[in-house]
Image: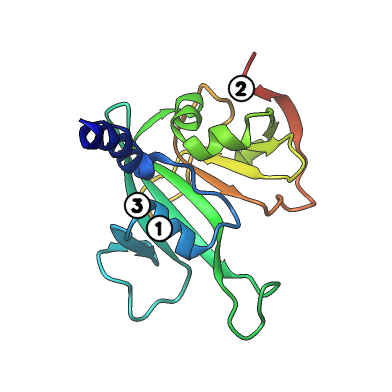
Amino acid sequence: MRRIAMLLIVLPLIGSAQNRAVEIGMTRGHVLKMTGAPNGYFADGIRTKAFPRVTVGYVTEIYDRRVQGRKYELRIGYQPDESKSRLNPPLVVSELRFVSDKLMPASQLLTASIEAGRICARGCEILSRGDRGLLLRSNGKEKFFIEVSAMTQFGTGEEPAVRSLDDTAGEITISTIPPFSFEKLTKLGDWPRN
């Protein structure tokens, strides 16, 4: 009886590993322990199962997620953290992209992302970037930026700007890199709305 009780306690913890939040600054080793191996890679606008041998740009790892019956991709970008070691710097998460398989209201996409919810737990300012769309800035001690975009198919043309949380969106990008200093930002409100 004691063994059965322990299994009932441990099994829910194992199953929840895929739905834990990945954080900016987390090491790649920690991400792999938490989520397992990636389902694929995204580079140069192409999704592949194996790590690309030759690439011109940035490579991200892809992890599939299901939230309330909808499919999403979590694309994780890394960079070396030379503050830990200059000769053997560990790779740390530098960017998170949460991509939906279908367009939906931006507020719904933000709610579906565990990472966005965690970053905005103390609130985020909703900022307009004019024709460049929406940006959320965290109110916490460490500043995070969440860019909300409509995301059209790679290379097919201009994306329509997301101007409010009611507009349709297909992708959010989370990073610690602020927008260009020359951009005019106008505060539109706070998220989550109280």
Q: Is any atom of residue 155 visible in this view?
A: no
Q: Residue furthest top?
A: 194
Return the mark for residue 154: none
Q: Position of residue 85 (x, y in %)?
A: 66, 79
Residue beneath disc 1: 33
Residue type for callout 3: Tyr
Q: Secondary structure at mark 3?
A: strand
Give the left or right position of residue 71, taking residue 150 as reference: left
* Mark number displayed over residue 63: 3
Q: CA distance from mark 3 to mark 2?
A: 26 Å
**Position in image of residue 39 (x %, y %):** 28, 57
Relative placement, left or right, of 152 versus 7 is right
Query: Which circle's residue, 1 or 2, is located before the other in the chain?
Result: 1
Rendered image quadrant of residue 125: top right
Cβ–Cβ under 8 Å for marks 1 and 3: no
12 sits left or right of 79 in the view: left
Asked whether residue 4 is in view, the answer is yes
Q: Residue at x 40, y 67 (%)?
A: 44
Q: Vertical placement of 113 versus 155: above or below?
A: above
Q: Residues within 10 Å of mark 3 (few under 14, many from 20)?
A: some
Q: Nearer the viewer, mark 1 or mark 3?
A: 1
Picture quarter containing residue 91? bottom right
As helix, strand or loop, the secondary structure at mark 1 comes to: helix
Q: Label 1 amino acid?
A: Lys
Pick whichever, 121 or 167, lies toward us.
121
* Circles 1 and 2 in contact, beta carbons < 8 Å: no
Of labels 1 and 3, earlier in sequence is 1
Location of the C terminus by quadrant is top right
Q: Which residue is most to the front?
A: 1
Question: Dot 2 corresponds to which residue?
Answer: 192
Label 2 amino acid? Pro
Residue drawn at 58 percent across, 82 percent down: 88
